[in-house]
């Protein structure tokens, strides 16, 4: 079964740190770009970060740039999100999701986030 | 950043109705547009990728079209399980922004 399972969420004080993990199974993890997407309570979806297969290209939303670090370990089929200097506005459910993207000759394709984890809740509060 | 705007924000409809949700991008994104369905307490589910391609396993009652800045998602005949929130998302450039969502409720 194709599956992503997040862990590492919890309650943390403002300014604190957390490290989220996402364990992949049932597919070739090293063939997919991976993402973190979050959803604040009662709000919409916010893309947080992406990391391509080789980890040579990494992208962040401005709201987390300089505070969050995405990484992956293809040998362990795992994705991570190190979150530092946490703020109240980082409170959300954090999802990991895979996306199939790449190039056919010179044509880029991006086939959407087709597998998602169940989410892990991060609460930043004093 | 590319802004994605969905309309309507909410919609009441009945089982069997045909409904259309619109998503507009603040600049041209070609066909790098995806649609997701989300039910309360659950992760989003990919319905449509590349503006009009039906994701495997998604019922054929869902269809989508568009390119450039204007996109639509249509449900041809609402089923009880279709009542959910729908999001569009652009995959043209980072940040990969989502629309604010359209909540589809039972009338």
Image: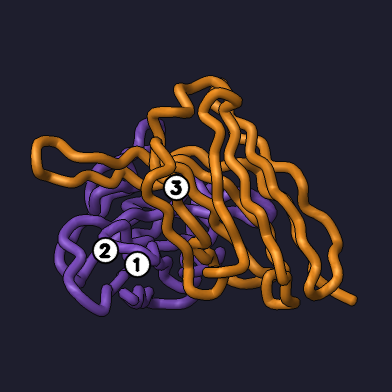
Q: Residue B46, how many percent across, how many down? A: 43, 46
- Secondary element at tag 1: strand
- Split into 4 quadrants, where in the image is the C terminus of chain A? bottom right
Using the image as rendered, state which of residue A108 and residue B52 is in the foreground. Answer: A108
Which mark lies nearer to you, 3 or 2? 3
Report the Cα–Cα distance between label 3 and label 1. 31 Å
Dots 3 and 1 on the same chain: no
Dots 1 and 2 on the same chain: yes
- Taking the image as shown, residue A12 lies to the left or right of residue B20, namely right
- Secondary element at tag 3: strand
Chain given the colour purple:
B
Report which residue position mark 1 lands on.
Answer: B21
Report which residue position mark 2 lands on.
Answer: B72
B99 w.r.t. A38: above or below: below
Q: Residue furthest left?
A: A106
Rendered image quadrant of residue B88: bottom left
Q: Can residue B80 be seen in the rendering of this structure?
A: no
- Split into 4 quadrants, where in the image is the N terminus of chain A? top right
Q: Residue B4, how many percent across, how many down? A: 35, 73
Q: Identify the residue at horizontal 31%, vertical 70% (top origin).
A: B23
Report which residue position mark 3 lands on.
Answer: A51
Return the chain for callout 3: A
Return the chain for callout 1: B
């Amino acid at each position: 079964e194709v599956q992503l399972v997040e862990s590492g969420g919890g309650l943390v004080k403002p300014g604190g740190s957390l490290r989220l993990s996402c364990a992949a199974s049932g597919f070739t993890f090293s063939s997919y770009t991976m993402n973190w997407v979050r959803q604040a309570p009662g709000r919409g979806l916010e893309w947080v970060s992406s990391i391509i297969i080789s980890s040579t290209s990494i992208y962040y939303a401005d709201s987390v740039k300089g505070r969050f670090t995405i990484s992956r370990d293809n040998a362990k089929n795992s994705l991570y999100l190190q979150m530092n200097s946490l703020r109240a506005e980082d409170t959300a459910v954090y999802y990991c999701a895979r996306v199939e993207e790449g190039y056919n000759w010179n044509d880029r394709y991006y086939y959407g986030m087709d597998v998602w984890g169940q989410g892990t809740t991060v609460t930043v509060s004093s | 950043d590319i802004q994605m705007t969905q309309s309507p924000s909410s919609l009441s409809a009945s089982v069997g109705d045909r409904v259309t949700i619109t998503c507009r991008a603040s600049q041209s994104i070609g066909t790098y547009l995806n649609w997701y369905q989300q039910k309360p307490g659950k992760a989003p589910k990919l319905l449509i990728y590349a503006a009009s391609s039906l994701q495997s396993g998604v019922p054929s009652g869902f269809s989508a079209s568009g390119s450039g800045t204007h996109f639509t998602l249509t449900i041809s005949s609402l089923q009880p399980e279709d009542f959910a929130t729908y999001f569009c998302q652009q995959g043209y450039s980072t940040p990969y922004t989502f629309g604010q969502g359209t909540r589809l409720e039972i009338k």
